[in-house]
Amino acid sequence: MKKVVALALGAVLLAALLFSMLAVVGCGSTESPADLIDKSIQKSKDNKTMHVDYDVKLDIKGDASALGPELEGMLPFSLGINGGVDIDDRADKAKAQGNIKFEGLDKVIQGLASSQGSLDAQSTLGMDMISSSLADMQFILLDEKMYIKMGGSWYEADASSAGDVAGVGGLTSGTSNIDQNCIQNAVQDPNKFGSGKIMTDIQEVGEEKINGTDTRHLKANLDLDKTMTEMASILRDCGGAESAGGLESGKSELSKMVKSKSIEMWIDKDGNLLQVKVDLELDPAAISETAGGLTGADTSAASGLESIALSMKLTISDLNKDMNISKPEGNILKLEDLFGSILGGSSSSSGTSTTGTGTTGGTSTRSSTSS
């Protein structure tokens, strides 16, 4: 189980790297690429609110029939996750609202359903509900509560327990004693998590416009081994010794799974990071080998997979503008009600937990004005 947690932490680490660089300010145009990145990271605390548009793409190619004749024709497939989020980090309890859209998920679910042969009516209904619910979601994080809109209804859960309700709470075990402010301060310190610690081959590509603003386009390679080592050190210093140990124990496996990793940044003349993009190429053979080692299953059939590519891009705007983030209106159900209905289970909840009084519908549209 420790290795599973370690691999999960390692995967999340790359996303954490992106969000640690979301609010970058304060470098002149004559700075070297490395200095520009480091000085920007150091002053990132100056940006407390922002809007972020994100776009994540997963592409898998190869012959899936090796996994079973019923999966013939499943590949290649692409899955996209995109949307936008308003972030307000001016108080002790951060606020956010946004939306999540899945592209290609319906085809994946249909393909998996077809591979199982004929399904009974309840299973078919469950598949349809999952596809419909996940097609276009909205979310609000407010006062340590998470509100999620799926299938036209709002659901509520404690932000800390949402993973437990979804059945993935085990991935966060051992993290409750970690000082989150300590981690945030550390990843914003170039001496602990700067370009020299986690990047190699830093270079300037040229000048480009992002949303009409002139920027310097920088590119570098991510040193995954060093990144995980530095992150483990930060976790240990911030009270997460167990998580640090798990990350270190899974470091070699995760490094084998990632064949190439690059990061690109677009920074304006004032030092604001306006866009960041990470591209990863994963090794299907190494992933299969690791999965087999963790589960004991024979994964040799996965050799038919040719490539797995993951791309993540964030575009940042509306820095330090007021964000109108409030509780959704109307009846709000318990999150476990949703999972109970999808999985065909029962729920002890009465169905209505609270009635929202806010003025926002929870979308990620930019309802901001200058502060």
Image (cartoon, grey):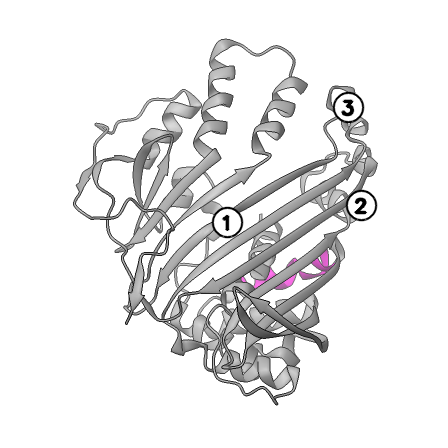
Above or below, 22 against 25 in this view is above
Residue 179 in view = no
Residue 252: x, y in percent?
72, 60
Question: In terms of secondary structure, where does tag 2 sit?
Answer: helix
Badge 1: residue crowd in 10 Å (few <14, some 14–19, many ≥20): some
What span is in magenta?
A: 243-255
Amino acid under disc 3? Glu
User: Which badge, 1 or 2, is on the more N-terminal residue?
Assistant: 1
Above or below, 132 against 154 in this view is above
Identify which residue is drawn at 63% across, 24% down: 112
Does residue 248 show up magenta in the picture?
yes
Amino acid under disc 1? Leu
Question: In terms of secondary structure, where does tag 3 sit?
Answer: loop
Q: Nearer the viewer, mark 2 or mark 3?
A: 3
Residue closer to the observer: 244 or 201: 201
- Residue 285: mark in rendering: 2
Above or below, 322 against 157 in this view is below
Identify which residue is drawn at 74% across, 54% down: 281
Q: Nearer the viewer, mark 3 or mark 1?
A: 3
Q: Which residue is mark 1?
A: 171
